[in-house]
Image (spheres, rainbow, N blue to C red):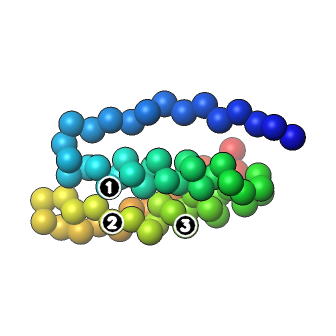
Amino acid sequence: MVGILLTMPSVSFNPMFDPLLEASWEATNAGIDVRLCEVGAAIQEVMESYEVDINGKVFQVSGPTKSMLEN
C-alpha cells in the first residue's frame, strides 16, 4: 500500500526555537519509515530525543500524547 504524506513547513524567526523545528522534521521523517501501527512510537522517540534552550533554561521536547495518536 502506498500512502501520501502532506506536510506544512514550520518556520521560526527566532533561532532559539530551531531545535523544535528540527525535532518536528525528524519525527515526521521517522514516521514515514515504519509500519502504520508503529508511527506514534517512532515519532515520540525522535521528539523526546531533543532539548531546547529557552532563555537559559533547557527543556526536554515532549512527544505527542497517546490520545493524539489514537485519532
Q: Which of marks 2 and 3 is nearer the N terminus?
A: 3
Which residue appears at 51% of the width and 63% of the height?
A: 46
Front residue of 69 and 3 = 3
Q: Earlier in the sequence, mark 1 or mark 3?
A: 1
| Disc number placed over residue 11 in the picture, else none | none
Which quadrant would the N terminus be assigned to in this image? top right
Residue 48 in percent (x, y) is at 46, 66
Q: Residue pushed farthest right?
A: 1
**Disc 1 secondary structure class:** helix
Which residue appears at 65% of the width and 57% of the height?
A: 40
Given the image, on which type of amino acid does mark 2 rest?
A: Glu
For residue 67, say whether it is visible. no
Residue beneath disc 1: 19
Vertical comparison of 48 with 7: above or below: below
Which residue appears at 39% of the width and 65% of the height?
A: 50
Given the image, on which type of amino acid does mark 3 rest?
A: Glu
Indicate the quadrant where residue 35 lies.
bottom right
Total of numbered circles in the picture? Answer: 3
Q: Distance between the residues labelled 2 and 3?
A: 13 Å
Which residue appears at 62% of the width and 62% of the height?
A: 42
**Drawn side of residue 50 relative to residue 2, left or right:** left
Q: How far apart are marks 1 and 3 (CA)?
A: 15 Å
Residue beneath disc 2: 51
For residue 31, say whether it is visible. yes
